[in-house]
């Protein structure tokens, strides 16, 4: 499990997209958001995963956001990353090519999700997309929505054919899945959410995809550093704390909501200027739900760094 990885260990922060009441990008708030992430020490930032509404943007919105993000982050010492989500492999390739022209060289890709791909189709996808851009690097977002969760052995086969697949992103809290990935595809840099990071860190080198950086910036860095040191006590103390946050803040919400509803609310709690509004047809928290969430935050977490 100590195989050298294709991508360095990192603390990867997601940037969200604030929308005005007429669903235009709130440019000053977005610029402030990205600037605060950079000021907070993040060298690895990404846009437009699921929480960042990468599934929802029109081509014109996509280009507007990437242009602005690239201007802020394509700089020495930074490694900005763009998420590309589409049902069309052709559109994925077109968007990567356009982003590459803006200076982006790291991309987060997920499998087309209209129908589940079989093993041969998965190989075609990775060889076609990653192979078209040999000077770029790719992180695979391994999520259930694509109907095919790739395991460690499958990643091993893909790695052998696709040298610029360098990382994965997994939201699992299943320790068996974490162990499988670390054992069988250790050459990839595996980014785990808070639910899997503590265990993964004890098995070898892995990275953190942080969900709570806006709420708890110091704790997020403490968590990441504890993983590097394999400090079991600190890792699981923070793991247990973060595991309860969602229940406390959102336990009153009795409906299922799209991912960004939660992540944007974290930002809104620390910065009320950052709207937690979602692009239609998705509905985020109502004003009443948001107000309850803020009361819970003020009661339990406002003083937590």
Image (cartoon, rainbow, N blue to C red):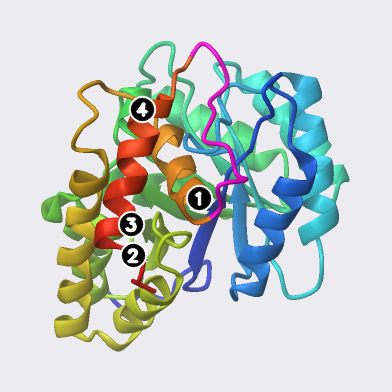
Q: Position of residue 89 (x, y in %)?
A: 61, 22
Label 2 SS: loop
Q: Report the number of discs.
A: 4
Q: Which residue is mark 1?
A: 267
From the image, state whether disc 2 or disc 4 is nearer to you. Answer: 4
Label 4 SS: helix
Q: Earlier in the sequence, mark 4 or mark 1?
A: 1
Q: Earlier in the sequence, mark 3 or mark 4?
A: 4
Q: Earlier in the sequence, mark 2 or mark 3?
A: 2
Q: Earlier in the sequence, mark 1 or mark 2?
A: 2
Q: Which residue is mark 2?
A: 186
Q: Are marks 2 and 3 in contact (CB under 8 Å)?
A: no
* Magenta stretch encompasses residue 273: yes
Task: State how far apart marks 3 and 4 are (Cα).
Answer: 15 Å
| Magenta highlight range | 271-281
Q: Which residue is mark 4?
A: 288
Question: Please, is residue 92 above or below residue 73 in the view?
Answer: above
Q: Let me know if residue 119 appears in the view.
A: no
Q: Are marks 1 and 3 in contact (CB under 8 Å)?
A: no
Q: Which residue is mark 3?
A: 298
């Amino acid at each position: 499990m100590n195989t050298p990885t294709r991508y360095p260990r990192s603390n990867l922060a997601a940037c969200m997209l604030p929308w005005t009441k007429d669903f235009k990008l709130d440019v000053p708030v977005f610029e402030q958001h990205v600037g605060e992430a950079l000021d907070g020490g993040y060298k690895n930032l990404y846009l437009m995963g699921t929480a960042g509404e990468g599934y929802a943007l029109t081509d014109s919105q996509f280009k507007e956001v990437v242009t602005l993000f690239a201007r802020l982050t394509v700089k020495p010492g930074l490694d900005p990353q763009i998420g590309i989500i589409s049902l069309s492999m052709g559109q994925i390739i077109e968007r990567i090519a356009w982003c590459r022209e803006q200076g982006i060289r790291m991309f987060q890709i997920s499998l087309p999700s209209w129908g589940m791909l079989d093993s041969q189709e998965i190989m075609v996808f990775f060889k076609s997309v990653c192979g078209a851009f040999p000077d770029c690097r790719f992180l695979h977002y391994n999520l259930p929505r694509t109907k095919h969760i790739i395991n460690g052995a499958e990643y091993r086969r893909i790695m052998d054919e696709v040298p610029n697949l360098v990382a994965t992103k997994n939201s699992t809290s299943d320790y068996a899945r974490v162990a499988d990935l670390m054992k069988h595809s250790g050459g990839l840099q595996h980014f785990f959410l808070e639910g899997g990071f503590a265990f993964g860190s004890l098995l070898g080198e892995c990275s953190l995809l942080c969900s709570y950086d806006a709420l708890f910036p110091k704790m997020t860095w403490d968590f990441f550093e504890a993983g590097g040191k394999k400090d079991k006590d600190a890792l699981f103390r923070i793991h247990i704390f973060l595991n309860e946050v969602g229940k406390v803040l959102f336990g009153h919400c009795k409906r299922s909501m799209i991912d960004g509803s939660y992540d944007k609310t974290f930002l809104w709690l620390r910065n009320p200027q950052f709207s937690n509004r979602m692009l239609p047809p998705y509905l985020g928290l109502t004003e009443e739900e948001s107000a309850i969430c803020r009361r819970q935050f003020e009661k339990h977490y406002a003083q937590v760094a």
